[in-house]
Amino acid sequence: MAVFSLVIGPALADARPSTASAADTAELGRSRHDWALSNGDLANTRATTRTPINSHNVKDLKVKWRLPLDGKPTFAGRMASNPIVVGDTVYLINLESGVTAVDKETGKVRWKHEFNSPSVGPNGVAYANGLLFGTTFTGAFALDAKTGRTVWTRELIAAGQGGIDVAPQVYDGTVVVSTVPSTFGRYVPGSMGTVYALDAATGAPKWDFNTVKDGDLWGHPEINSGGGLWYAPAVDSHGRIFLSVGNPSPMPGTPEYPNGSSRPGPNLYTNCLVVLDSSTGKLLWYQQTAPHDLRDYDLQDSPIITTAKVGGVRTEVVLVAGKMGKAFAYRADDGTPLWTLSVGTHLNDEGPLPAEPVTVLPGVLGGVETPMALADGRLFVPWVDEPNTLSATGGFGLPDFTKGRGGLTAADAATGKVLWQRNLPQMALGAATVANDVVFTATYDGQIFGFRTSTGELLWKSTARAGINAFPAVSGNLLLVGAGAPGLSGSAAVPELIAYSL
């Protein structure tokens, strides 16, 4: 059950962000600011042409400055989010929910705001109209972007009932965040992920949406839980917001209830693309990609909005992917399926699980774990091959990171046809990010790659001093990469935000 409490801070108490028009909504963050939202814009394209970085000069990228990442490390390290850039300032959040503002040119810290609220990520921050928005593990907040002083905070979930591990999305004077029904990997029986739309100026609630249909936990609420968002939703110019929803639990099952039999049925709206009216939270349509999930196959990646020819007609399309190792395309207006693309290795990934353990791919850390990118009609999909051993009653366990592999697949956004693919030596957990005709991705062992968007040719490579499960921003001639995970170096890792410059 959600718990609401509100604190208005002393700074900017009278600030009121102006709302964007519907026509401006899809470009907010792209046209008005450098990289003001976690995925660059409200369409979640993670692509920019407002940079001199391209296929001809990417080889010249060199380290300009390094910012040590502070905070106590969690399971995911110190940083598992996307920095943002507004004007001459870089903003980032660590995995204790602490926010830092950094001079873009020098890398010197301007201010810090500590919350001491550990999160497993991916979290993040977003900017609009002088305010910086983020989340702690139990609530949301707004800070004065110039000073870091608190404008408002709002608690959304009681301690022990789940958490918040999502970057905010901001549109039309509204901030959207979501709870998830787990605390550091442990799913809380009876907990349901809920999406909250808050007033950007005050934190007051506008609407909420329970990602478990009708609030009914499928028969055994004393055992079951599910839903919630792990990544920021997309918003289009027609007033629609697109949510990608996480998995149900327990999974695969328990000795008393094998193969998820404590939660019979498809378990809506888990593993669904859910589309709402962005001003009211009213459900418009949904599509489920992994009914009655037994394998932790969240449809968790941020949806991407684009246009493509459908039957010869330019049509708004939404693209989404998840841990089942598949990307999907739907008509944005009514959810009509257009195509499905499988990436990575698939083994024992459908249907009930046997009583005896079997190897499953994608595993719990496999499939499409981190955000895709879109540019010039091409969809760039980072994927992970990381196996797990599962049975009808249990499994998972700690993954062996040394055995994980990955890749980047480029596909035609209109058809799902593979254009090129590159295998990578480790798990691709650094998302995909496009600067003109270069697509960047990174692996858990700290390697960063720049490929030509048209052919997949490797143009640039660098190695960080820590592992990477965070996502870069591109601003001007800078590529900003957070290397905050242990990677394969363990205690020898040097966690830092790296600014590469031409």
Image: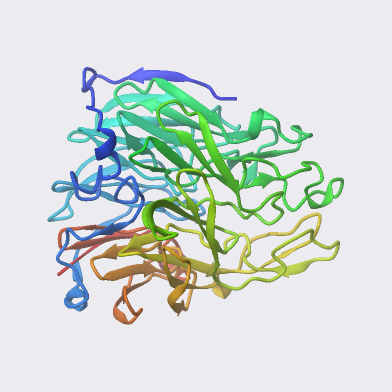
**Colour basis:** rainbow
Residue 421 picture location, percent across and down: 44, 77
Left/right placement of residue 59 relative to residue 26 reads left
| Residue in the picture at 42% in, 29% down | 197
Residue 260 picture location, percent across and down: 78, 48
Q: Quadrant of residue 447?
A: bottom left
Residue 237 picture location, percent across and down: 33, 40
Quadrant, the C terminus: bottom left
Residue 413 picture location, percent across and down: 41, 63
Residue reaching furthest to the bottom: 457
Q: Nearer the viewer, residue 331 or 429?
A: 331
Left/right placement of residue 177 relative to residue 457 reads right
| Residue in the picture at 55% in, 73% down | 402
| Residue in the picture at 72% in, 54% down | 294
Asked whether the viewer can see residue 114, the reply is no
Quadrant, the N terminus: top right
Residue reaching furthest to the front: 312
Q: Nearer the viewer, residue 216 or 3?
A: 216
Left/right placement of residue 73 relative to residue 440 reads right
* Tally of numbered discs: 0
Asked whether the viewer can see residue 475, the reply is yes
